[in-house]
Amino acid sequence: MALNVFDHDEYRPPVWKSYLYQLQQEAPHPRRLTCTCEVDNRPKYYGREYHGMISREEADQLLSQAEGSYLIRESQRQPGTYTLALRFGNQTRNFRLYHDGKHFVGEKRFESIHDLVTDGLITLYIETKAAEYIAKMTINPIYEHVGYTTLNQEPTLKKHLPHSPEAPDGPVPAKDSHNTEERLTSLVRRATLRESDLAPKYEKVHNFKVHTFRGPHWCEYCANFMWGLIAQGVKCADCGLNVHKQCSKVVPNDCQPDLRHVKKVYSCDLTTLVKAHNTKRPMVVDMCIQEIEARGLQSEGLYRISGFSELIEDVKLAFDRDGEKADISSNAYEDINIITGALKLYFRELPIPLITYDAYPRVMEAAKITDPDKRLESLHEALKLLPPAHCETLRYLMAHLKRVTQSEKENLMTSENLGIVFGPTLMRAPDLDAMTALNDIRYQRLVVEMLITNEDMLF
């Protein structure tokens, strides 16, 4: 089954496979076997399906009449623990049952025992009837032909997105709110962006989270039905891709974040942000640096002196709310230290630091080398471990900080001073003890100082 795009003008909708959906419709329905007598000490979160402390054999005899029938019993071997006895495939299956506000026997948690049993019967039925089919369903996925789609959006692309060469330093100009891209399904959107130079070529993994889909949903990787009552699959929090949990393990690292899913600027993964906005670097970095260089390079104590924290928080909220339309001009914030504070705050709040956890150990090793030439060479190699978007942002920032030092006579900020400010802002130790982290601070300062001084050689 292939899905084709023709000249980017139109596409053929994918053929969603119905086999697993049909199996779900055929799955046995739950039949609660109620207890006809009063049972002492029945837990308040169980109903008449609770039969007290009966044996496996008694439960098997009670359930033998109907497929899908179920009851709850207290374990005779371990009093105080409870078992869900369920009839499936002409045999009684026993599951240890738990309750922590919701009912569960595995990862999924349910509001009611009825929902738990319904989902369990669907899963048992499909995985019994279609085990071989499920094992092979990632072969020849529709994703390989075009990509992912969103089912409830208009499936047409009227024209190819216009080619828009990217500016060498700064964000791509804002597009009209009625731009064609906003009306695309993510399927066509990805197919278009694949061949376009509109977006920087940064690789990004999908940010999958377990998700409960309301109504029937199909996997946008393999085109098969996503079975079950809840938590049927996973959804990418950044681009909206819906796939089976097992399919998520083989989806390529080509997430194209959508602004409908990326709701903020601060505390957002850096690569996610730049891909969502189709920029080389986060717009907050570009806009703050441009503002600082326009009116603040000669300000004494630049980056060392803090602005009012309430106003810095205002700038953060403006970026989160308005993005590249945020007003950070002198009319809004006369004190340049508010803008420098907002930039530092952005780097501090990154979930993955600008100098990432993966690169951090190698960067620290490089800083501890005594020979200057070898130290510089080792740092250059360590920077290769950074994701492209992180490396580009670090390059741009260091070029800016070098220009700050060129006004040292006026602002009194040397590369050493900037290293003290930015060392712990741009990097942090991954899960190190407090003493080791404290010892790393002097090397963090040294790293930033080296990056500023040798910016033209290292990038």
Image (spheres, rainbow, N blue to C red):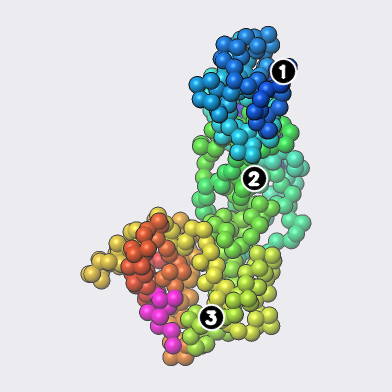
The outermost residue toward the bottom is: 409
- For this view, does 302 lie left or right of residue 265? left
Residue segment shown in magenta? 412-421
- Residue that mark 3 sits on: 306
At x 60% / y 38%, what residue is drawn?
100
Q: Mark 3: which secondary structure?
A: loop
User: Where does the image place residue 317, in percent across and percent down from the top left?
Assistant: 66, 68
Q: List the residue tagged with mark 2.
A: 240
Question: In this image, 298 relative to 439: left or right?
Answer: right
| Sequence order check, earlier mark of 2 and 3 | 2
| Residue 416: in magenta span | yes
Residue type (three-letter) at the residue carrying disc 1: Cys
User: Closer to the camera, 152 or 320?
Assistant: 320
Which of the 4 image quadrants contains residue 110? top right
Tell which tag, 1 or 3, sits nearer the viewer.
Answer: 1
Examine the rendering and report whether any part of residue 366 can be seen. yes
**Given contact means CB atoms under 8 Å apart, are the residues at marks 2 and 3 in contact?**
no
